[in-house]
Amino acid sequence: MKLVDKTISKDELKKMSESFSGGLVKAVIDIKKEIMVVDAPMHADQEKKLLDMGSQQDDLWGINLYPDLTDDDFIEFDSMINVRPRLHNFSRGIEDENLQKKIIAIVSKLVK
């Protein structure tokens, strides 16, 4: 598990994806602090790490990164931690397009 608070290269993500079937890297983003944790078998583990670091649960969202893909295929908005009826998110996906755009902007800033 790795905290990304500055930048991470796509090459480093590619190396991480080799240990996970499907060529993906799981990540949890803190949309307020604009940081993320990558490279763990479960989003819940990454979420716990960020919570232990002082993040607020409502600011944390799970995604998958596909370092071999580009554009819209690079980020997948899918995680069990995203099921948050109190925030009007009723599925594993992130339903709010503005939230998706914010996450894309944060990932774009952190992944070089």
Image (cartoon, helix red, strand yellow):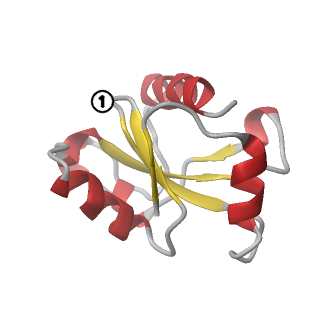
Residue 33, given in percent of the width and then of the height, sits at 30, 29
Crowd band around label 1 with a 10 angstrom C-alpha radius: few (<14), some (14–19), many (20+): few
Which residue is nearer to you in this view: 59 or 5?
A: 5
Label count reads: 1
Residue 66 visible = no
Rendered residue at 42%/65% (across/down): 43
Which residue is nearer to you in this view: 85 or 56?
A: 56
Answer above or below: position of 75 versus 111: below
Rendered residue at 27%/42% (across/down): 88
Residue 73 horizontal side relative to residue 30, left or right: right
Answer above or below: position of 33 versus 69: above
For the residue labelled by badge 1, is the local secondary structure a helix, a strand or a loop?
A: loop
Which residue is nearer to you in this view: 96 or 44?
A: 44
Residue type indicated by callout 1? Lys
Answer above or below: position of 63 versus 100: below
Residue 46, given in percent of the width and then of the height, sits at 37, 61
Asked which quadrant contains residue 55, the reply is top left
Residue 25 visible = yes
Rendered residue at 63%/60% (across/down): 25
Residue 108 horizontal side relative to residue 27, left or right: right
Residue 71, given in percent of the width and then of the height, sits at 79, 32
Residue 21, given in percent of the width and then of the height, sits at 73, 77
Quadrant of the image containing the C terminus: top right
Q: What residue is pinned by disc 1?
A: 33
Rendered residue at 68%/63% (across/down): 16
